[in-house]
Image (cartoon, rainbow, N blue to C red):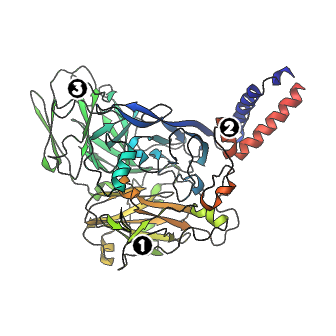
Amino acid sequence: MALFQSSSTSLFLLFHIALLSTLSLAADPTITYDFKLSYITVSPLGVPQKVIAVNGQFPGPLVNGTTNNNVVINVRNDLDENLLMTWPGIQMRRNSWQDGVLGTNCPIPPNWNWTYNFQLKDQIGSFFYYPSLNLQRASGGFGPFVINNREVIQIPFAQPDGDFVLLIGDWYTRNHSALRADLDSGKDLGMPDGVLINGKGPYRYNTTLVPDGLPYETINVDPGKTYRFRVHNVGTSTSLNFRIQGHNLLLVETEGHYTVQQNFSSFDIHVGQSCSFLVTMDQNATSDYYIVASARFVNESLWQKVTGVGIFALFKFKKEVQLVLCLKHQVIFITNDNFIKIFCPLDSQDYSRQNTTASGARPNPQGSFHYGSINVTDTYILRSLPPSTIDGKLRATLNGISFVNPDTPIRLADLNQVKGSYKLDFPSEPLNRPLRRDTSVINATYKGFIEVILQNNDTKMQSFHINGYSFFVVGMDWGIWSENSRGSYNKWDSISRCTIEVYPGGWTAVLASLDNVGIWNLRVENLDRWYLGQETYMKIINPDENGETEFSPPANALFCGALASKQKDLGNKNSAVSILQGNPNLFFTLLMAFCAAVLVFS
């Protein structure tokens, strides 16, 4: 029995034997990642600051999966505060236990591990992950998440010559703790200090605005080839206009759904949104070109520094290039011998159309779901207002309610008979009553077809997101929504996505089929408003629940609040043990492998 002289070596070998067995025997492959979140010091804008890294990287590493893959991500919290990781746009079927927001999960304490375990069920597309608590995303912790088509499903365009991810976002040199303190004291976050592209500051396009020596993003491409660019706005609160000097952006996908393909000279990407473009390197190969992400819907003359600039490197620079930003977001690139003018059109619904001839994760056309002919079962008009003082604190609201996260997560409270954790009384429309703080949740109808009107009476552009779902974006306009507004809805080929912009003084209407049971977060993606309470949850439960519709809590479920006494100490566990706790099938496979090894070597 010399093989088992080292118990740690034996566990390591058997764990990987079991993992390989699971991969080969399971119906769908499993991909595994270890994430360690910790602080590192970087200077993206020339000022040393503490950021949140994943495995020492800022931004974090790519999660690269394929439709129907099982995903196991072991998260180690080496921060000095609680942590949750969320995966917006990943539609965890019947499994909100893995969602990574406070209404569904107890937080991971410092120096603890916790393993997320979910399936990429019937999905494709471009997404990103990030920490969901206490403005932590404003300090990093984010990274790209790509779900590829299975080989048997064709993509609706020629295979690109390369695939690049661009994480763009506004950035403060104050970390998330300082930003949080500002909001707690009733202050506005103010103008960001810049825009980062893949965690790097701008190329020195302006010697006054940009310090010398900043690292900037460079992407090496070949003339004549076509590349896919997956662009994500991971910022705090600023809409960004994205463009590439002299090149067209062919929009092909938004958050897991293929669009009608349309060329843009520039494109607005709002907080929390993700878009895929095809870009052909069809310009003069003797020059390099700017990649630009600049603040949108602000006073450009005051926000000039809130611009990120990277470089497409074709060949060595042969021209001196200067960037000028003009009012109304016309963009003029000036070289020493010519002008290239790019106009940024206002967002329109022209791009919000689905490519109904393309397949998504499955071979049937995406357009086969005739959402326009389904009767709406419930309508919710959600009105957001500028932050107001409630109980002496600055708070943000939906329908007059500033959400207070429960001490005990909602579904965990249900299953353990914890009373008073929340209320199922969220109003379906704004009410004429004083603003208040409350843990008020939408009592949604399982298999209902819900209409949600997002009415933005705030002064800032906002993005809204629903976890666990995609929704059809059917209408968008200025002013106050009314029932007559339904006459302008797109009921045929509207794009389905999970994050949508709502203009200040305007409204956006979405439709969603509520077929995914669980507790799902509905929130604004702007981190300041989210932190101040602009969110709620939809509780969607099968009334004929027989134990099969919704997943049971995972074996490694964390407990807090009224259930804190049930929690076992999981601190300082190694990755193998933590993964086993979140994956009971793997545990039994390991046990079988262990028994087989004993029989073989005894």
Viewer-side label of 3, 2: 3
Query: Which residue is denoted by mark 1 in the rendering?
Result: 380
Q: Is residue 286 above or below residue 363?
A: above
Examine the rendering and report whether any part of residue 580 can be seen.
yes
Residue 393 percent location from the top left of the image: 36, 63
Q: At label 1, which amino acid type do we have?
A: Tyr
Q: At label 2, which amino acid type do we have?
A: Leu
Number of numbered discs visible in the structure rendering: 3
- As measured in the structure, the alpha-carbon distance from the residue carrying label 1 to the one carrying label 2 is 43 Å
Q: Is residue 127 left or right of residue 240?
A: right
**Within 10 angstroms of label 2, few (less than 14), some, or many (20 or more) residues?**
some
Disc 1 vs disc 2: Cβ atoms closer than 8 Å? no
Residue 308 percent location from the top left of the image: 27, 37
Query: Which residue is denoted by mark 3 in the rendering?
Result: 212
Helix, strand or loop under label 3: loop
Earlier-in-chain disc, 3 versus 2: 2
Q: Quadrant of residue 371?
A: bottom left
Residue 55 percent location from the top left of the image: 51, 32
Query: Which residue is denoted by mark 2 in the rendering?
Result: 23
Q: At label 3, which amino acid type do we have?
A: Asp
Helix, strand or loop under label 2: helix
**Within 10 angstroms of label 3, few (less than 14), some, or many (20 or more) residues?**
few
Examine the rendering and report whether any part of residue 526 can be seen.
no
